[in-house]
């Protein structure tokens, strides 16, 4: 299967598939014509990567997960530990987003939103806390 067909089958952009090949996450065979030839195993790897990325795993985490996936002697504990660490990172990002949300809500509440040029949001962004500099 060529790269275009692999992209259509997996839902990944051709550019992404090429990048995954460039960084060693997939290694399609090459036909006599030099074109990439994706086998069932490579399609499985691409789908695996797509799913892992959709869960927010970094490329390095995907590399480690792929290594575990391909290792029949793996310990599920290793996979679980990696997923738990990722979940911790996700929770930290969620907490940061909640703090950002609160800050934006406060700024919006402080801005009168009328015809007056004074604006608490711009004051905060400008670092002045009062007026424009």
Image: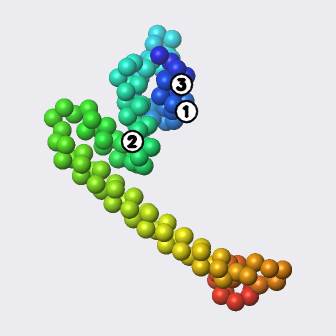
Q: Nearer the viewer, residue 88 or 113?
A: 113
Residue 126 seen in the figure: no
Q: Dividing the image into 4 quarters, which one contains the C terminus?
A: bottom right
Callout 3: SS? helix
Residue 8: give its label: 3
The answer to whether residue 65 is left or right of residue 52 is: left
- Give residue 25's quadrant in the image: top left
Q: Which dot, 3 or 1, sits closer to the camera? A: 3
39, above or below 127, in the image: above
Q: Badge 2 local density, few (<14 within 10 Å), some, or many (20+)?
A: some
Q: Nearer the viewer, residue 41 or 118?
A: 118
**What residue does disc 1 label?**
13
View extreme (bottom): residue:
130
Q: Which of the colour schemes (rainbow, by chain, secondary structure, one colour) is used?
A: rainbow
**Point 30% across, 56% down: residue:** 85
Residue 52: give its label: 2
Q: Badge 3 local density, few (<14 within 10 Å), some, or many (20+)?
A: few
Looking at marks 3 and 2 on the same chain, the residue that comes earlier in the sequence is marked by 3
The answer to whether residue 93 is left or right of residue 112 is: left
Image location of residue 42, percent across then percent down:
38, 25
Image location of residue 34, percent across then percent down:
49, 16
99, above or below 132, in the image: above
Tell me the distance, in whole angstroms, between the alpha carbons under discs 3 and 2: 18 Å
**Point 47% across, 16% down: residue:** 1
72, above or below 3, in the image: below
Q: Which dot, 1 or 2, sits closer to the camera? A: 2
């Amino acid at each position: 299967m060529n790269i275009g067909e692999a992209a259509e089958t997996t839902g990944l952009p051709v550019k992404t598939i090429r990048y995954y090949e460039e960084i060693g996450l997939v290694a399609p065979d090459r036909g006599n014509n030099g074109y990439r030839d994706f086998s069932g195993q490579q399609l499985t790897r691409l789908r695996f990567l797509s799913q892992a990325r959709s869960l927010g795993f970094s490329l390095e985490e995907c590399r480690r997960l792929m290594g575990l996936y391909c290792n029949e002697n793996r310990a599920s504990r290793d996979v679980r530990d990696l997923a738990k660490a990722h979940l911790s990172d996700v929770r930290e990002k969620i907490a940061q987003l909640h703090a950002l949300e609160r800050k934006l809500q406060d700024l919006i509440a402080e801005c009168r939103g009328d015809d007056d040029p004074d604006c608490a949001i711009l004051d905060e962004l400008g670092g002045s806390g009062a007026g424009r500099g």
